Image: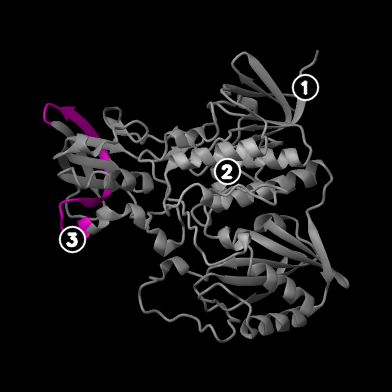
Amino acid sequence: MAEEVLDYLVVGAGPAGLQLGQFLGRAGHRYLVLEAGSAPGHFFETFPRHRTLISINKKHTGYTDPELNLRMDWNSILADGDDDPVLFTNYSDLLFPDAPDFLRYLADYAAKHQVDVRYDTRVTRIRREQEIFVLTAGDAEYRAHRLIMATGVTKPYIPQFPGVELIDQYVDVDVDPKSFTGQRVLVLGKGNSAFETADNLIETAAVVHVGGPRPVKLAWRTHFVGHLRAYNAGILDMYQLKLQHAILDGDVREVRKDADGYHVKFAFARADEVIKEIRYDRVIGCTGFRFDASLFDEDCRPELTINDRFPAQTASWESVNVPGLYFAGTITQVRDFKKATSAFIHGFRYGARALAKVLNERYHDVPWPHAELPAKPDALTEAVITRINRTSALYQQFGFLADVVVVDGDTARYLEEVPVDRVLEDPPDDAFVVTLDYGPDHDKVDPFDFVARAAQDKANDHGEGHYLHPIVRHYRRGELVATHHVTENLENEWDKEVHIGPLTAFFTQEL
């Protein structure tokens, strides 16, 4: 008997894989999720190593609208057709929750929605037979017309320099700070894992240096949540206040180990000494992770990009060189790298929802869901104002996902949460693209400096605002012909005449 060929195989039962399974099952597709671990969210059984998530869990918002609450809930994943969703805010009261609570949440989500997951099934090979993907796991093989990789970035990135094999790595280093009492420690890397590790040691270690080739970027300034978060930035205070700990800018050239510890040759980027040798008791590498493409046979291996860290993807999250191979979860960050939020749950949950629509449209003849309305200025204004005051997707995926109003004669179709790049790849003849986004050079403005900001009581027609605000762009046959900025608002509430009147005038002029 021939093995069943499924519509979809999903690899990885983390938050993205579970959510996609729920959406695929709800749509009636034949699918299966394959998971190496014995329960959902295997990654979170180990990471972050110090067991505190930096994804916000803000329970008290003052809102009763569940859509608005999702703007402050960075851990809940979405479900199709569920009037009583499983929300992570019911699992922890902490603003920065514990990882075990997230594991409980994922298990309950999978159970409630009966997501079809095959656990303890580690995929070791992926190949193609004609147009069919064939996955090997142990003695079993699984076949599907289409494959969705939701595995995350699982392969540690190890920089190459002499002696790198001698140092500890983030994935398995001892996390008990008492083990470092009185020691001199070098932490390599300048991301949140490095600073998480350093902050864990600042009370017990004598000296902690955090070193890497690029300057530290702070999330509160850049608006990119993957940059250094204030929660992990305690060592910055101690550095600036001359308490022995320090941040080093430069590269490690060599590490050697002898009886009195590690000797590190460090090439400074912003100091008079070109190379200095510094002695440490411990050296810890916290230099990040990357996508593991080694599972794929050569003839179906996805092309990689950004220093081979991620699979290269189209605007529909499909591999650029392997048709039918799609990606979900944190590996989709390649599309908005270090700009929006696809690297994180509160971003990629909307990408996964959009991917489900892409698959329905492309393979099952299900049009992108839309509402129809008159192509009249008042009607378009009301639709846009209603959405921008509620949407969590455009709020979280700023500048990346858009609502699209397609005008066709006297009627218009309103499509929600479409990737901006996908719209521009195959543009309608006449469309308005609605995003929430920051102003130009927003990441160069110090939010605590007394810089001029756009007035909130007058129209912002020329895009003077730096803060998050709605932007409506009009395209005709793919050419940008007009742009309107709705003025920014402290409470992110765009429902006053200063917002409605100018937008109505814009639609009147463009229509």
The answer to whether one can see residue 380 in this image is yes
How far apart in space, not on screen, are marks 3 and 2 (Cα)? Answer: 39 Å
Q: Which residue is mark 1?
A: 4
Q: Are marks 2 and 1 in contact (CB under 8 Å)?
A: no
How far apart in space, not on screen, are marks 2 and 1 (Cα)? Answer: 27 Å
Label for residue 105?
none
Residue furthest left as drawn: 260
Q: Residue at x 59, y 84 (%)?
A: 459
The x, y position of residue 445, in whole percent, is: 41, 71
The x, y position of residue 451, in whole percent, is: 39, 79
The quadrant of the rendering that contains the N terminus is top right
Q: Amino acid at mark 3?
A: Leu
Give the image quarter of residue 364. top right
Q: Residues within 10 Å of mark 3 (few under 14, many from 20)?
A: few
Whichever of callouts 3 and 2 sits on the residue coming sooner in the sequence is: 3
Color scheme of the displayed model:
one colour
Q: Which residue is mark 3?
A: 241
Whichever of callouts 2 and 1 sits on the residue coming sooner in the sequence is: 1
Q: Residues within 10 Å of mark 2 (few under 14, many from 20)?
A: many
How far apart in space, not on screen, are marks 1 and 3 (Cα)? Answer: 65 Å
Give the image quarter of residue 184. top left
Q: Amino acid at mark 1?
A: Glu
Label for residue 329?
2
Element on which disc 3 rests: loop
The quadrant of the rendering that contains the C terminus is bottom right
Identify the magenta region.
238-260
Does 469 appear above or below 419? Answer: below
The x, y position of residue 428, in whole percent, is: 79, 62
